[in-house]
């Protein structure tokens, strides 16, 4: 896959997640840009359930940004209640997806942050996940997005 502009990377991931949700019986709509913390609104008409989803997409071979940094971490981490979907755009035009509950995301973020906080020593640094750290969540659509729940 050729290197894309950041806006295109994000949109590729959001459209991909919406398509996957529709395939699983959900109605999914992308939010307007700059809506804090929510990229997709989902509704399951069969079960009358709703969800809000944050999508993070990356092309980097090794890491993906979480949207958090060392400055806002403690303030932001407590307000996370939505699932996160990480979309990896690979060089061969394939796509990998990692689906985390809010609890999974918070736990992994805290683990990464605790290792970083001593290294950054008061400097602002982005919180990143390694793709390898997300492997246990790969393609967990049926676990987190079965026909009757997200």
Image (spheres, grey):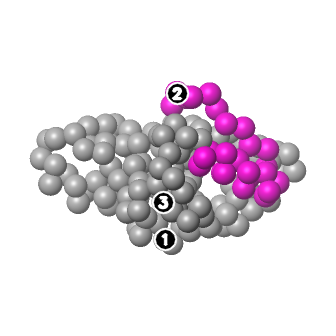
How far is mark 2 from mark 1, CA to CA? 29 Å
Q: Position of residue 39 (x, y in %)?
A: 59, 38
Q: Residues within 10 Å of mark 1 (few under 14, many from 20)?
A: few
Q: CA distance from mark 1 to mark 3?
A: 12 Å
Percent of width and height locating residue 62: 37, 63
Taking 67 as reference, is 138 above or below it? Answer: below
Disc 2 is placed on an element classified as loop
Q: Quadrant of residue 73?
A: top left
- Residue occupying the point 85% across, 45% down: 45
According to the picture, the residue beneath numbered tag 2 turns out to be: 34
Residue behind mark 3: 104
> In the image, which is nearer the foreground, mark 2 or mark 3?
2
Tell me the element at label 3: helix
Instruction: Please check the rendered image and state whether residue 65 is part of the magenta-colored stretch, yes or no.
Output: no
Q: Identify the residue shown where x is 38% and y is 58%.
A: 63
Percent position (x, y) of residue 22?
79, 51
Q: Residue furthest bottom?
A: 136
Q: Seen in the image, is 25 located left or right of residue 77?
A: right
Count of numbered tags: 3
Name the residue that disc number 1 marks: 135
The answer to which of 17 and 48 lies nearer the viewer is 17
Q: Which residues are magenta?
A: 12-36
Work out which residue is located at the far front of the displayed protein and give it.
2
Instruction: Tell me, yes or no, whether the highlighted magenta stretch contains residue 34.
Output: yes
Looking at the image, residue 49 lies above or below residue 131: above
Quadrant (top left/top right/bottom left/bottom right) for the N terminus: bottom right
């Amino acid at each position: 896959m050729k290197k894309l502009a950041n806006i295109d990377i994000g949109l590729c991931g959001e459209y991909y997640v919406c398509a996957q949700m529709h395939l699983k019986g959900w109605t999914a709509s992308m939010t307007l840009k700059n809506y804090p913390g929510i990229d997709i609104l989902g509704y399951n008409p069969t079960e009358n359930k709703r969800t809000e989803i944050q999508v993070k997409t990356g092309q980097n071979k090794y890491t993906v940004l979480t949207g958090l940094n060392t400055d806002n971490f403690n303030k932001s981490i407590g307000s996370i209640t939505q699932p996160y979907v990480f979309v990896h755009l690979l060089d061969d035009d394939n796509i990998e997806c990692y689906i985390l509950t809010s609890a999974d995301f918070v736990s992994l973020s805290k683990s990464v942050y605790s290792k970083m906080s001593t290294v950054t020593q008061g400097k602002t640094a982005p919180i990143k996940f390694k793709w390898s750290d997300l492997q246990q969540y790969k393609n967990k659509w049926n676990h987190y997005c079965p026909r009757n729940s997200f």
